[in-house]
């Protein structure tokens, strides 16, 4: 459960989401998860501090999944222990009129982190080949050249989108930005349970919206859209991590393990200080101790 390679999907074979486990068999109990996750958060905090001081790499963590897949809770449990000065979250909702006046990656580019920081994308540019794949009529209102009706949203259109998404990540990698992509794989039965909880528990009522059930009716269409997106945008250098998400605690632990593996590969280190700077620091330290400053 702990290895990065166990959940990596690089697009090397066709994907059958229906055959992919949504729960880890014989996973650890909650006490073990809590202990391991706390240790991982401490390790991530150290890695993030080094990354921030080095300022060579920016990190974009992408979280995708069906409604109730656990994105918000994962962010809260995995990233809350990191320094907020170098860690932030962006949630991508329905595009605004301003965003639709630009190319579909414009709003993503506006949200990229500075080098040295980690930014979590709660949903991402991949929404543009997910929701619009299930509801192609949305594209007819976006003033896209050549798209006047649903019939115009053909295979060539999707080929261009997948091509642009893959090459955008390649561009980011060349600029020093690491994109780490997670798909939280949830079963329909578990989604049913989580929707029931949102209705039954008063403190969770605010999370439920009638539109949730409307979109649930398109479950099979979304599974098809996710399958195609994952197959067409996963590469060896930019894989997707397919995370069994029915058990929230296990999913959080797996994601934190993978993040540690990926950040360690970047070898973030604190900047080295010159001998002269060290001498000056020792002088200042002595002056402080002597109360001369």
Image (cartoon, rainbow, N blue to C red):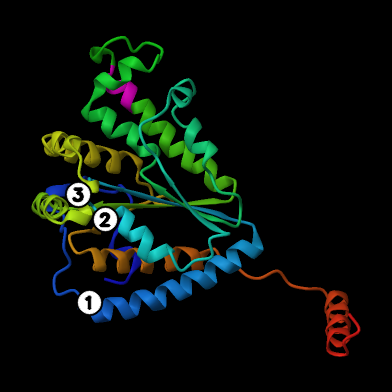
For the residue pair 119 and 155, the one nearer the viewer reads as: 119
Residue 267 visible in the current orientation = no
Crowd rating for badge 3 (residues with CA inside 10 Å; few <14, some 14–19, many 20+): some
Q: Is residue 223 left or right of residue 118?
A: left
Q: Main secondary structure of the magenta part?
A: helix
Count the marks.
3
Q: Which mark is residue 247?
A: none
Q: Is residue 219 left or right of residue 84?
A: left
The image shows residue 228 at horizontal and vertical percentages of 25, 37
Q: Residue at x 28, y 28 (%)?
A: 132
Q: Which residue is mark 3?
A: 205
Q: Residue at x 49, y 23 (%)?
A: 102
In the rendered image, the quadrant that contains the C terminus is bottom right
Residue 236 visible in the current orientation = yes
Whether pointer 2 and pointer 3 mark residues with C-beta atoms closer than 8 Å, the reply is no
The image shows residue 28 at horizontal and vertical percentages of 21, 77
For the residue pair 270 and 142, the one nearer the viewer reads as: 142
For the residue pair 121 and 210, the one nearer the viewer reads as: 210
Q: Which residues are magenta?
A: 153-158
Q: Which residue is mark 1?
A: 30
Please tell me whether mark 2 sits on a helix, a strand or a loop.
Answer: loop
Q: Which mark is residue 70?
A: 2
The image shows residue 282 at horizontal and vertical percentages of 84, 84
For the residue pair 157 and 138, the one nearer the viewer reads as: 138
């Amino acid at each position: 459960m702990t290895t990065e390679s166990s959940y990596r999907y690089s697009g090397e074979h066709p994907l059958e989401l229906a055959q992919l486990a949504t729960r880890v068999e014989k996973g650890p109990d909650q006490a073990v998860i809590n202990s391991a996750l706390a240790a991982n958060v401490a390790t991530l905090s150290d890695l993030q501090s080094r990354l921030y001081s080095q300022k060579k790499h920016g990190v974009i963590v992408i979280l995708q999944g069906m409604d109730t897949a656990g994105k918000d809770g994962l962010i809260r449990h995995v990233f809350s222990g990191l320094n907020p000065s170098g860690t932030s979250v962006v949630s991508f909702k329905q595009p605004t009129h301003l965003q639709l006046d630009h190319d579909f990656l414009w709003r993503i580019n506006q949200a990229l982190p500075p080098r040295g920081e980690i930014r979590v994308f709660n949903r991402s540019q991949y929404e543009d080949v997910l929701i619009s794949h299930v509801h192609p009529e949305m594209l007819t209102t976006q003033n896209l050249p050549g798209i006047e009706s649903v019939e115009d949203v053909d295979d060539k259109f999707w080929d261009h989108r997948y091509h642009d998404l893959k090459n955008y990540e390649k561009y980011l990698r060349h600029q020093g930005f690491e994109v780490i992509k997670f798909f939280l794989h949830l079963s329909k039965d578990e989604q049913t349970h989580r929707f029931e909880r949102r209705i039954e528990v008063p403190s969770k009522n605010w999370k439920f919206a009638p539109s949730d059930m409307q979109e649930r009716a398109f479950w099979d269409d979304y599974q098809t859209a996710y399958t195609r997106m994952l197959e067409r945008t996963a590469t060896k250098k930019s894989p997707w991590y397919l995370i069994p998400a029915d058990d929230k605690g296990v999913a959080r632990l797996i994601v934190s393990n993978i993040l540690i593996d990926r950040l360690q590969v970047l070898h973030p280190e604190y900047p080295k200080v010159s001998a002269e700077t060290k001498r000056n620091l020792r002088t200042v330290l002595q002056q402080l101790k002597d109360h001369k400053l």
